[in-house]
Amino acid sequence: MKIGFIGLGKMGKNMVLRIAKAGKKVVAYNRHPEPVKEVMKAGAEGAFSLKEFVSKLDSPKIVWVMVTSSAVDEIFEELVPLLSKGDIIVDGGNSNYHLTLARNEMLKKKGINFMDAGVSGGLVAAKLGYCIMAGGDKEVFKKVEPFIKAASVSEGYLHTGPVGSGHYVKMIHNAIEYGMMQAIGEGFELLEKGPYKDLDYHKISHLWNNGSIVRGLLMEMTESAFSKDSKLSKISGYIADNGEGKWAVQEAMDFNVPFAVNSFALFERYRSRENDTMSDKLVAAIRDEFGGHGVKSKGKGKKD
């Protein structure tokens, strides 16, 4: 059985490479051909149009769509007419789960199975493996599971429940991430403004990655950011967001859940676009370290 991947960006390309390395058959398509040629060198089968892409898949066809949430509907418009009853689409991007539920209803009428998969791990997951939260029918999940397992770190995937649950769990995951990053940023802000003016933030973050309670991936990204720029003097404190934190805050309001830390972290991102503090710079830098999301250089446009 083969799996087809649409979208070879920062996450999609590396997922294809991991799956191909595990000996699974992958067909890859991207609107820009260069990433397709790159994964073909690693053993994936390439396609340079959607029609060619679909024609190379076995039935029932499994198509993993790994594009930004804003591009999903555009891809579906082109893809769905090329598929048949019993085929499977997996949305592996960070879509709003309300849209996921609506897309599921649309596909159900056409007899096409749908799954949603929240994917975490950032750029380091290319080597370590991804963490995948998958929602959908159990029998459909079983068909896709071998490919999910190939892409994931050991014990790094879960069938979370029905369609929508994967994106919902990933949304909450990202909201927690907002809060944790904000806490790290504020801690270093206090170090910056406190009484000791010659502290080495790179050494401190390295220390905290060795045996401390706050050690972990985000602290490793902190250490990496300070190793490149000891005072983060080259970047702006502008912190972007992709929407998941906002969606989670809205959900918390709908279900009357106290969501203080993560709500505050979201609003701090909005505030960061007006000020320029160590806290903001560090959250922006960590975000770029783990996900390659880009930072805004001082006096220049956004770095892609």
Image: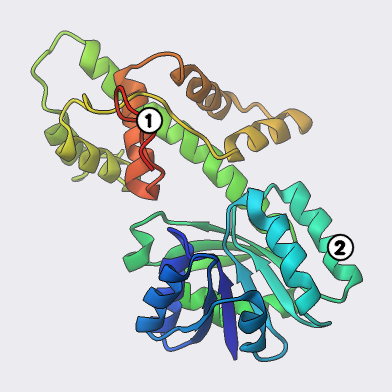
Q: Amino acid at mark 1?
A: Gly
Instruction: Report helix, strand or loop for mark 1.
Output: loop
Q: Specify the amino acid type for callout 2.
A: Met
- Asked if residue 199 lies left or right of residue 14, the reply is left
| Closer-to-camera residue (10/74) | 74
Residue 16 locus on image (x, y percent): 46, 74
Q: Would residue 275 be seen by someone viewing this image from the given angle?
A: yes
> Disc 1 or disc 2, which is closer to the eye?
1
Q: Is residue 230 left or right of residue 139?
A: left
Q: Quadrant of the C terminus?
A: top left
Cα–Cα gap, marks 1 and 2: 40 Å
Q: Which residue is mark 1?
A: 301
Q: Position of residue 78 (x, y in %)?
A: 73, 67
Quadrant showing the N terminus: bottom right
| 114 or 55, nearer to the observer | 55
Dividing the picture into quadrants, the one containing residue 266 is top right
Percent coordinates x, y for residue 84 in the rendering: 81, 82
The answer to whether 212 is drawn above or below residue 103 in the figure is above
Label 2 packing within 10 angstroms: few (<14), some (14-19), many (20+):
few
Q: Is residue 153 visible?
A: no
Looking at the rendered structure, which numbered label has been put on residue 106? 2
Residue 189: which quarter of the image? top left
Of residue 38 and residue 105, the one placed in the foreground of this image is 38
